[in-house]
Image (spheres, rainbow, N blue to C red):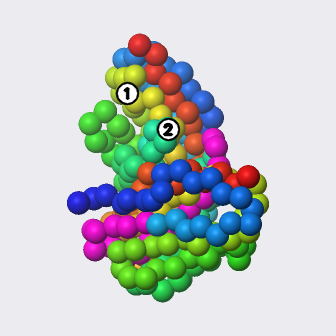
Amino acid sequence: QQQVKQSPQSLIVQKGGISIINCAYENTAFDYFPWYQQFPGKGPALLIAIRPDVSEKKEGRFTISFNKSAKQFSLHIMDSQPGDSATYFCAARRDNAGNMLTFGGGTRLMVKP
Amino acid sequence: DTEVTQTPKHLVMGMTNKKSLKCEQHMGHRAMYWYKQKAKKPPELMFVYSYEKLSINESVPSRFSPECPNSSLLNLHLHALQPEDSALYLCASSQDNLAGAQSYNEQFFGPGTRLTVL
């Protein structure tokens, strides 16, 4: 059972545009929501993470928006660059399960020059 | 040093072979994880070690055998694998995996070992 649903599966954006990736969850026991970026041949790397008591968190060009009542969160990449082309995974951590992450299905982002 | 290293980078093995994957971190982390990642899929958790003890086994077949010789090293011993076990095997570590932490306990991932089972 997929507990974190991610969309879209793939996304093509022009350079300078805004990339938006959405995730939805059902389990209210999740207490942290990190986003990971993965380049081909590399392991995932943490981009940004948010707690459910915060509605928005921004780090540089990356912003997480969080809607606790709707159980949805999204990643916005402003001024998208070709170097942002990668696979993005949202994830959720269960607060009573030893730092275990449940990953969304992933979004393959391509930023065209 | 915020790096998790994994060796080898690539491994090709037959179904009757025995091989091992190695993971190392020198960040003083006390939790270490093995994940399996198939192409175009998210990482799937296999095992979690906490303070060198196996704390979580996600119903992984016994042909995969983890080992944590010390707090910096994590091994995954492979025996009698099947072609469907071909995947990218990722190791990760975090400061610990205790519940109730007030900040996100980041998992740092290694680059993975690309395993092909013939």
Where is residue B45 shown, x and y percent of the image? 59, 64
Q: Which numbered marker is on residue A94?
A: none
Where is residue B111 shown, x and y percent of the image? 44, 51
Where is residue B85 shown, x and y percent of the image? 70, 58
Residue A64 located left or right of residue B43: left
* Residue A9 picture quarter: top right
Query: Which residue is painted at 49% across and 20% down in the image?
Result: A13
Q: Amino acid at mark 2?
A: Pro
Query: Which residue is painted at 51% across and 29% down in the image?
Result: A109
Residue A4 shows up from this direction: no
The local secondary structure at tag 2 comes to: loop
Reading the image, the residue beneath label 2 is: A40
Which stretch appears magenta? B23-40
Compare residues B3 and A86 and report the one nearer the observer: B3
Reading the image, the residue beneath label 1 is: A83
Where is residue B20 shown, x and y percent of the image? 55, 68
- Observer-side mark, 2 or 1, equals 2
Query: Which residue is painted at 23% across and 60% down in the image?
Result: B1
Is residue B32 located in the magenta-colored stretch of the structure? yes
* Residue B60 picture quarter: bottom right
For disc 2, the neighbor class at 10 Å (few under 14, some 14 to 19, many from 20) is few
Q: Amino acid at mark 1?
A: Gly
As measured in the structure, the alpha-carbon distance from the residue carrying label 2 to the one carrying label 1 is: 12 Å
The local secondary structure at tag 1 comes to: helix
* Mark 2 vs 1, N-terminal side: 2
Q: Chain of mark 1?
A: A
Residue B93 located left or right of residue B27: right
